[in-house]
Image (tube, rainbow, N blue to C red):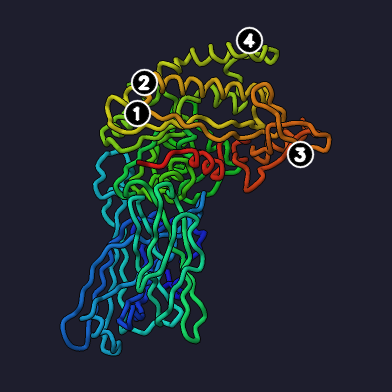
Amino acid sequence: MAAVASGADVAAATTPAEPLNAISPGRVSLGVEFKGRAALLVPVGYPLELSGRKVEVRIRIRFANGKPAVRTWTERPHSGALRPGDRRGRFGFVHAVLPGPDLSSRLRNPGRVLSVGVTISARLFPDSSDGIQPPEANQPLYRGAHSQSGLRRAAPGTCSTGMLLLPTRDGGTRGQLPRCGAMLRWSIDRPPDRGTATVDGPAFELALADSQLGSDSFRLRGTGSGQVPVFRTVEVRAGRSPAQGISVRALGDSVTAGFGYFGKTGRPMTIFELIDCRPGATVFNDACSSNSSNRNASIGNQPNYLADYGLSRNISWPAQWANEYGITDYRNYAVTGSAPSDWQAGGQFHNTLLSIQGQNPDYILLTLGANPLLSNVLFGLDTMGCALESDLFGDFTQCVLDAFETVDLDDRLNQIYTSLVTNTTSKVIVMQYHLSIPASALAYSAVQLGVMGDLLNEIISDEAGQVSTSRIAVVSPPRFDVGIDMTPVYPADFSCSWLDFKVDGPSVQSDASQDELLALHPLSFCGGPALGPPWVIDGDTGIHPSAAGYSQMAGQMPAPE
């Protein structure tokens, strides 16, 4: 990658993620530090998965006379504002090196610099040894190097990138202002949504209250005599505890794994790719999921997790929750298609469960229990055998409960929850299932599908409560409104019909499902969402959440302690 010439906050890119060892340092230039001292500006192109990760930067400067100067430091480059479903392969970041008074005086005459060498290295999991993650994640280094002859002064408007802040609620946070090719006067151009930001000499300060947690940003404005204003954004990921001290592991099925998105590129699958992506009957390799590099469910019988387990793509609800608070010690072991039995003794992912327990993370996140029964119903296979004419709160409800009993859903969930609580000190957070009305579920009405989902979520909540109310937290997604009258399952108190027909709310279902719902309810259907894209993807006929839907689910999660 060529050197980042502009020093912009984030260099936009849409290319697929590149392999390891793809750090690309560019040409170093000489800027101006506070009160006229020297600063070195180092532009670097990073793979997306290194966003927010600690990297080590080493710079070596050879002079025409005297000993070479070597500086080594660590920093957290970042890719800018969080994007649900990030499809970039790389991002640009400009480091600022503040060499100190002695080296600064030697750099005042850049013509005496013979050469500048930069080496940058990083690794995602420096202490990884679980034996489950992909081989490349155990390789120690992402590495890049650059060497150049001489040193040129930076253009006045070339500046370093705004910082990534990881503050905690127990006090203010101070960070350095951007350094540029000329002295600039900095001010707060756009304040943060939460907290107060101020500029103080060569630095800025951010003060937060106890409740002002999560992702945020504020923008700095730099002005100088005869200069066009320069803007830099400071990204904030605020939590109750230091983000770098929190570990998160995830397990479960497709809703935890983020099925329907290709992990290597962040691209959602299309309906034409569903045949290759739909999980098999008994062996699951996590294909077409946001934490996986596999693209075909019938090729291979093992999950191939991404080096960062899909964190940088910011798709699944566990990934979006971790990113909201700047947590990078994150591994998502969920496998699309898996059922509770697959994680128990004798199941194909039992060793993965044991490994997670052995890691004893601060948090274990999961959604589990819909497979195989409810998933087959949503895909149009009537495995429950519930007749269409069944009474909604009589025969039909009992039929669904009987079907759950045939796979021992209650006992299996109870055993998994018990195992996690007994064998770890982790806080376990269980996300319940969202409501989807897919175009493929031809055997059941929307109301019947709503009843199925409610019954499943009740079992999840009941079994978690029986195991531990102090160690297990059950989180409910926001309601995924359908846009039709869903009584008696849900009140109909919203209308967008000129005939004043009442529905549950503006639909957030997939575009394909909304088209079908409109055809079935032409006078009353209320399309949506009110803001943003649908919360459910089209590629699987409208079953799994979209990145926007997962954002809604992650937003229901409590802040990490």
Is 4 placed left or right of 107 in the picture?
Answer: right
Front: mark 4 or 3: 3
Q: For residue 31, which quarter of the picture?
A: bottom left
Quadrant where the image shows the C terminus: top left
Front: mark 1 or 4: 1
What residue is at 73 percent from the left and 37 percent from the top?
526
Look at mark 3 in the image and give the residue it sits on: 496
Structural distance between the alpha carbons of marks 3 and 1: 43 Å
Task: Find residue 471 and name its label.
Answer: 1
Can you name the residue that lies furthest to the left here?
A: 67
Front: mark 2 or 4: 2
What residue is at 60 percent from the left and 28 percent from the top?
379
Is 224 placed left or right of 39 in the picture?
Answer: right
Q: Amino acid at mark 1?
A: Arg
N-terminal of the pair, mark 2 or mark 4, is: 4
Number of numbered markers: 4
Secondary structure beneath disc 4? loop
Q: Are marks 2 and 3 in contact (CB under 8 Å)?
A: no
Structural distance between the alpha carbons of marks 1 and 4: 35 Å
Q: Amino acid at mark 4?
A: Gly
Secondary structure beneath disc 3? loop
Structural distance between the alpha carbons of marks 2 and 4: 29 Å
Q: Is residue 40 above or below residue 286?
A: below
Structural distance between the alpha carbons of marks 2 and 1: 9 Å
Look at mark 2 in the image and give the residue it sits on: 467
Of residue 428 and residue 11, the one placed in the foreground of this image is 428
Q: Amino acid at mark 3?
A: Cys
Look at mark 4 in the image and give the residue it sits on: 394
Q: Is residue 35 above or below residue 327?
A: below
Structural distance between the alpha carbons of marks 4 and 3: 32 Å
